[in-house]
Image: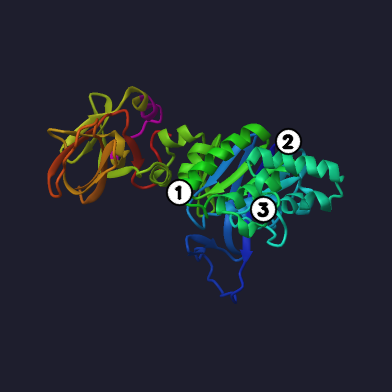
Amino acid sequence: MAKVVLKDIKKVYPNTETKKKKKKGDEPEKKSNLQITEEGVVAVQQFNLEIADKEFIVLVGPSGCGKSTTLRMIAGLEDISSGELWIGDKLMNDVEPKDRDIAMVFQNYALYPHMTVYENMAFSLKLKKVPKEEIDKKVRQAAEILDITQYLDRKPKALSGGQRQRVAIGRAIVRDPAVFLMDEPLSNLDAKLRNQMRAEIIKLRQRINTTFIYVTHDQTEAMTLGDRIVIMRDGFIQQIGTPQEVFDHPANLFVAGFIGTPQMNFFDGKLVKQDGKYAVTVENITVVLSDDKQKRLSDKNVPEQDIILGVRPDHIMLCADGIKGKVDVSELMGSSVHLHVSAEGKDVVVIVPTNGNAAHFPMGSEVNMIFGGNVAHVFSKETEQNLEW
């Protein structure tokens, strides 16, 4: 078991194009949201993270944000351009992947098609010249944990996607690694199977009790699996925290929009002070913020200003007088109705509980919306940072 520490990790892919001469004072070029410097394309930069022994960390973010590159640097499949990677008390920058005591599960399973399930799971142990009896014991234990004992004599082509992924996980388990790396292992599965496998990984984590580093673009996986979540964008860490922390207190506009389904609604508004108390105004309504928000804003002495106001769909209520909008789409989801409302020139999503009654909101019908001062998130219009933090 091992603690993993990443200190100022940076990954630069050298430019393959012919270098253009730049004038003095020219800004670094940006292409596909990644910075291009004289060295090349910067895929990951200023990455600092300390992962405790037996912790389950999830790296999450949109495609191209650098999360898989970071995982591959930990695995030794990508060189580290600068910074330090420690696993346990050993510096790993120049250590070969096979000597890092890690096991990796890939998105595409990466099973040997000509080998049986048993042979696939036993292969790494055979290479290490582990005794046959011990190999057999470890393979059968892992197969029992993953409920694939009945498939040990089959070849991968005779298995479903979920079964193949179990075999890939089993092959990693038998190595008894210090660190378990998973690169979007569920993304090739259908929605129902993904939910089942997510539950299996939670159970697996409790049984094998090792350090997990898991990469996904699916924020539901991140929220349900991780002890802590690392949210990335364009090679930079945006926020690190428990699932509840990043949901309740997003550090900036990007995190607020990325975490939560449906995503947070945003309004143009103003942060004002009334009788010494902070309030937000949107359109024709003013809402005084809750006491804990008052304290955080006061402690930072935040001035009155134009803001972007964020409110989650399930925190907006319909009322007699509030922010006016027109219903564009009404989606019945069983226990609730998701209303897509056009308000303030934006598409606002409101979740209305049905409470067992049929709720009818025809297209074009007018609604009024309000929210409480305890659920309002206040972001700077200039920096997009959460003004409370």
Tag 2's secondary structure?
loop
Q: What residue is drawn where x is 25% and y is 49%? A: 347
Q: Which residue is mark 2?
A: 1
Residue that mark 1 sits on:
191
Q: Quadrant of residue 174?
A: top right
Tell me the residue at 54%/50% (across/down).
Answer: 186
* Earlier sequence position, callout 3 versus callout 2: 2
Q: Which residues are magenta?
A: 295-305
Quick check: can you spot residue 350? yes
Q: Which mark is residue 218?
A: none
Q: State the residue in front, 380 or 76.
A: 76
Identified by mark 1, the residue type is: Ala
Q: Nearer the viewer, mark 3 or mark 2?
A: 2
Question: Which callout, 1 or 2, points at the residue further toward the start of the chain?
Answer: 2
Q: Position of residue 187 (x, y in %)?
A: 52, 53
Question: What separation in Å lies between label 1 and label 3 (alpha carbons)?
Answer: 30 Å
Q: Residues within 10 Å of mark 2 (few under 14, many from 20)?
A: some
Residue 105 to residue 350: above or below: below
Left or right of residue 107, residue 289 in this image: left
